[in-house]
Amino acid sequence: MKALVVGGGVAGPVTAMALQRAGIDASVVEARGPDDAGGSYLTLATNGIDALRAIDAHRLLAAAFATPSTLMFSGTGRCLGRVALGSMRPHRDRSHTIKRSMLQRLLHEEAMRRGIPITYQRRFVHADTTAAGVRAVFDDGSEEVADLLIGCDGVHSQVRRAIHLAAPLPRYVGLLNFGGYTPRVQAGEPGAWHMIFGARAFFGYAPDASGGTVWFANVPREAATRAERDATAPDQWRRWLLERFAVDRGPAAALIAAGKLELAADNTHDLPTVPVWHRGPMIIIGDAAHAPSPSSGQGASMAIEDAVVLAQCLRDVPGISNAFTTFERVRRKRVERIVAQGARSSSSKAAGTIGRIIRDRTLPLIFRYVVTERSMVWLYEHHIDWQRHAIEQRVA
């Protein structure tokens, strides 16, 4: 069996490695160049690292730094609570943060080391089902045929439209996303993300293992246009960001002023539910099927889980269609619950004056009694046993 994986972000190479482990030949096609990963930093939670362990790829995270917890603050500097960002059990992996481009490079190198071909600068255009499988067409005029096609091409997936022309579009959640890095400045408690619910925007930062600080900002605003981004220099965005955090306590303004802006005015989208995940020999996984807002910290982890479970289904369930149906049954409830949770978190970042007062008074109680390590077991303690049959996997 031959599989064609469209998309070379996080989900793509992990999917190809999982398929190979299941005895299925796979190749990856990526629209961008090998050094054009984009983005800033991402966090892999315990459940995502557990899924990497299933295909023996977890060692790639040696380049990441541990971020097992989150500290929440109001814009006035008041600590609202501490929340575990993953499992805190002794035998489980702690959550780790890594630069997206580095993780992608490491995954590509590992996939190619395992003999998986990856081709670049070939953008998927459309696909047709055939009697033998699927034929994919790319923007350079080339074609590829395979027994099945897996769309790992993100929230703006073209494979999703090839499967279902009326598929829902991603939803703008009302936040512009910025990411940056400040070298030679260690801000905050090591091993923790620090989140500030500011008066005008949301700010997060974490000290890394190299003596610097990783940070991001989510700013409530209408979506940025391509023309606006093209016309706005990084220093202009930096000055605009500094205005957003001028009245807040904490290191946000200092980190922005001294740091490098690596991601600017990225429109934040989610994808709450996609009714159709597969048609014939084509399927979508990861952000192409269920994209959470970044506030959930689960986008990459869910994609990695998807990749491993899909490979198990194709290994254990006779027939591609039956395997796809089993995959959806095992995964849909869990991923849509996570996306919904992320949407609730995003809404708290864009609260108005009255909403901020209510939020800052209620969050300490929520973090103490509602969002606890025990209440998050379903999310972080999710385990994929590679040796277990796909239909016996826990539906969470």
Image (cartoon, rainbow, N blue to C red):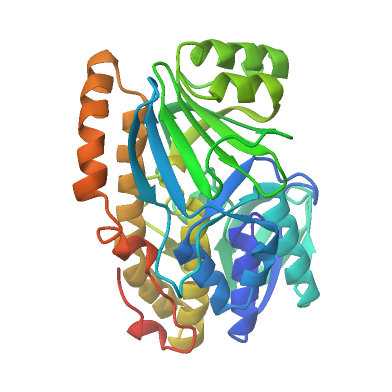
Q: Is residue 366 left or right of residue 330?
A: left
Quadrant, the N terminus: bottom right
The image shows residue 48 at horizontal and vertical percentages of 50, 64
Residue 110, can we see it? yes
Residue 293, can we see it? no
Q: Is residue 178 left or right of residue 25?
A: left
The image shows residue 314 at horizontal and vertical percentages of 50, 81
Quarter location, residue 156 = top right
Which residue is pictured at 69% across the width and 39% down the height? Answer: 212
Which residue is pictured at 71% across the width and 19% down the height? Answer: 234
Which residue is pictured at 27% across the width and 27% down the height? Answer: 360
Front residue of 326 and 76: 76
Task: Please count the marks in the image.
Answer: 0
Instruction: Say above or below: 264 vs 41.
Output: above
Instruction: Say above or below: 18 vs 119.
Output: below
The image shows residue 65 at horizontal and vertical percentages of 62, 54
Quadrant, the C terminus: bottom left
Front residue of 137 and 346: 346
Which residue is pictured at 76% across the width and 77% down the height? Answer: 114
Q: Is residue 159 left or right of residue 296?
A: right
Instruction: Say above or below: 339 vs 79.
Output: below
Front residue of 196 and 324: 196
The image shows residue 375 at horizontal and vertical percentages of 25, 58
